[in-house]
Amino acid sequence: MKTIILGKQSLLSKYLCLKNKKNIVFSARGHASISSIVKEIKNSKKVNLILNNFFPSNKISDITEKEYEKFYDQSILFNAKLFSKLDGKNINKIIYSSSSSVYNSIRKDYQFKDTNNKSLYSSTKIAAENLIYNFASKNNIPFLILRIFNMYSEKDDKFSIVSKLLKSINRNNEIKLYNGGENIRDFIHVKDVVNLINYFIKKKNLKRTVYDIGIGKGVRLKDLINFIGKEKFNIKNTKTITDEVDVSIANIEEVENKNFTKLENFFSKYSSNKKKKLEYKTENTKNILQDIIEDYIIYGTGNAGKQVFQRLAKQNRKVFCFVDDNPKKHSQKLYGKKIISRKELIILSKIKIINHLIIAIPSIKKQKLQKIREIFYPYVNEITYVPLKNTLKSEIISLSDLDNFETNEILKKKQKVINFKVFSKELNSKNILVTGAAGSIGSQMVRQLLNTSVKKIIGYDNSEIDLFNLKNELKEFKKISLYLGDILDEKFLNYIIEKEKINFIYHAAAYKHVGILENNIESAIRNNIFGTESVLKCAQKNSIPIVTISTDKAVKPTSILGLTKRVSEILCLEYNTYSNPSKVVRFGNVFGSMGSVVPTFINQINQKVPITITDKKVKRYFMTLNDATYLLLWSIKIKKVNNILVLNMGKPIKILDIIKSLVKVRRTVDPNYSYKIEEIGLQKGEKMTEELTINNKTIKTKHPDIKLATDPIYTSYEINNLLNDLKEINDPNILKKKLKNFLLNEFN
C-alpha cells in the first residue's frame, strides 16, 4: 500500500523517505500541489496519508503580524482545501504529526506574553488536529494524532534545543536559558519517531487515536548542559516570565517499541567526562489539554442533590453534571445536566482535574462515604458533603456547610483554580514533614499533599486528641505517618527526619491565640521562637529546605503573638542559604480555622445568644483554607528567596460584614431568626486593622498571588544577643519589653 507524505521540507518527511524509498512526498504549498496529491490518491486503491506539513518550526519565533496569512495557509488552510477535494474512500489511514506543545496551551487569563509565538503555534496545532478529526470521523477513516515531544537529529535539524546546543559547542553562540534550565524535557531522536510511525501504520486495532511520541522520561536542560560541559557554552540566564510548563514528558504506556536512542550517546563525544551519566526524570501524570472542570459535580440525584443544585443556582454557580449509582438514571438528565455513573466519573477524574465534588446523599453510610472520598482524593481538589442523617440538625449551620457553598461568597472572592500538577517537579517521590499537622493549616496541608505525587507525608504535633482525630479521618491513606511530639525536642525531630528520610519541611506549628498568649508570654516565646529555632536547626543539620508559616500580626506587632512570630520570621531568614533555603510565608486570617473568630460567631448564632464583636469598625484580611495551603505549596517554586513571601489576601473585610453574611446563611433555614450584636472593645494586643508588609513595598514573583516583602533585616549579632537575653530573663513584662525594643525601628 502506498504511503503519501505531505510536507517536503519537513525533517520527519526526509527521514521517513530515507527509511522507505517507496514513500511519495509532496510539497504542501500552492494549489498545484493539491491537484497533484488528489490525482495520485485517486489513481491508487488505498493510501496511507501522513501529514507533516506546517509552518517551518525554525521560523515560528520570527512570525510577525504581516505573516499571519502565510502561517495559517501553510499550517491549516492547505489541509482544509485538500480535504474538500478528497474522496475518503481512497484513504486507509491518516497520521498527523502534531506537537507536545498543545498540552497546557488552553488558557483564559492571557497573563503571559506569547514568548516566541508559542501560543500561536500550539493553538494552531490543536485546530489542525480538530480538522483532521472532523474529516476522518465523517468519512469513517482511521486516524492518529501523534503529539511529538522534542525531536532532534544530527543533520537538517534547525529547531530543537539539542541542535542549538550542538551548534554552539565551543562557539560564542548565545544560548538563552529560561528558569535557570530547571525545565524538564523529553527528547526523542527523529529515527525513533520514524520507527514509531511505521509501527502505527502497520498496527491494527489501536486502542487510542492520540499518542504521545517521546521516550517517556525527561532531562533537565541544566543537567544536559552540565553533562556536555558548561564551560563550552555561552549561556544567558533570562528572567523573562513565560508560560512554559515545568515538566514535559511523554506518556508511552501503550507503545510497544521502547528501545530508544540515548541522548547521552548523542553527546558523549563532546563530553569531557566519559564516565558521567545523564540523569533522567519520570512523570506519572497524564498529559491533557484542558485539565480542569471548574463547575460543580453533584454526587446524588435525590432530594438533597436537587436542593444542592438549586442553592448553587441561586448563587449563580454552575453544575457540570450529576452522578448516581442507579443504572436506570444513567444518560438521563436532571435540570438539563447529564447523569453519569460512578465508573464514568472515575474515567473523567483520570483525564481531568475536578475542582468540586459535592456528595449529596445524607443516607449514605460513613464507610461508603469514606470509600468515595478515598477514590477521588487524588483527582478532586475539594470533596465536600451534606451532613449525614444521623448528624443532621435542622436550623443549625456549620463550618462544613460554609465550606461547601458560602465561604467565597462571604469573603467576596472568586474561586481560584487549583492544579496540583504544577508541583510534580518539586514534590515527586519526596517525603514531606508537616509540623503542627493536627492544626487547621497543618491538617489541610496534609490533605492537599495527598493530591500531589509525594511519596510520604509525615505529620508532627503535640496535641494527642487532634492527632487522633486526624488519624481517624485519614486512616485509609497508607502514605501518611503521624507522630506525637514537641518541636523543642530536637533529638526526637532529628530521629524522625533520619528515619523517614525527610526531603522537605512545612513548619506550621505555633501558638496562635492572641488572648491566651498575652497572659502566657514565656510559653509563647518558648514555642514560637525557640521551637522554630529547634526545627530550623534540624532542617539545617539534615540539609532540608523549609517553609515556615507566619501571620500578618507579625507586622508592626502589638501582641505577644505578633512579636514572637516576627522574631521567628527574622530567625528563619538567618538560616536561609542558597543550598538550604529557609522561606517564610506570611498571610492573614484563614476563614473558619481553629481558634479564629468565625466558629465563635457560628456558635453564638446557633445558640441564639448575642453576637460579640470587639468593634464594629474592625477589619481583617481573610482567605480560604484551600487557597492559603495551595499558595503555601506554591511557595516551594519561588527561587532565591531572601525575605518574606506575602500572599495576596485581597482587601481587608469588616468583621461586621462577616457576621451579617453568617446571619443570612442562618436565615435560609430559619427565616425568623433575629440577632443582637454587642461591642466588647478591643482586647489586649488587638489592632483595628492589620497590615501585610512593614513598609508597603513588595516585589513580584512568578506567581501573581505571591509577593516578596522588603522588610528590615537584622545581623547575626543582633539576633543572637536577643535570643541569649530571652533565655536568661524570667520576668514576663521584661521579656515583652525586650521583644518590642528589638523591633523598635519597624514602627517608624
Image: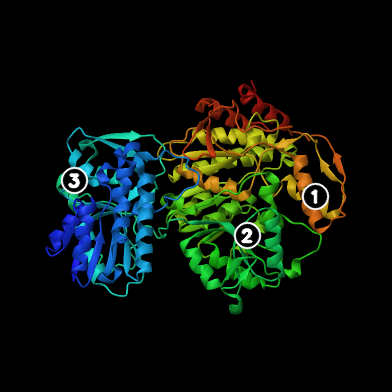
Packing grade of label 2 (10 A; few <14, some 14-19, many >=20) is some
Instruction: Report the label total.
Output: 3
Q: Residue at x 35, y 69 (%)?
A: 139
Image check: 505 left or right of 509? left
The answer to whether residue 64 shows anywhere in this view is no
Residue that numbered label 2 is attached to: 470
Q: Is residue 702 left or right of residue 527?
A: left
Identify the residue at the far left of this view: 21
Q: At numbered mark 2, what does the secondary structure look like: helix, strand or loop?
A: helix
Label 2 vs label 1, nearer the camera: 1
Amino acid bearing label 2: Leu
The kind of residue on which mark 1 rests is Val
**Which residue is nearer to you in this view: 267 or 214?**
214
**Residue 428: x %, y % from top left:** 42, 55
Give the residue at mark 1.
Answer: 663
Location of the N terminus by quadrant is bottom left
Q: Is residue 732 left or right of residue 461?
A: right
The chosen color scheme is: rainbow
Q: Nearer the N terminus, badge 1 or badge 3?
A: 3
Outermost residue on the bottom side: it is 328
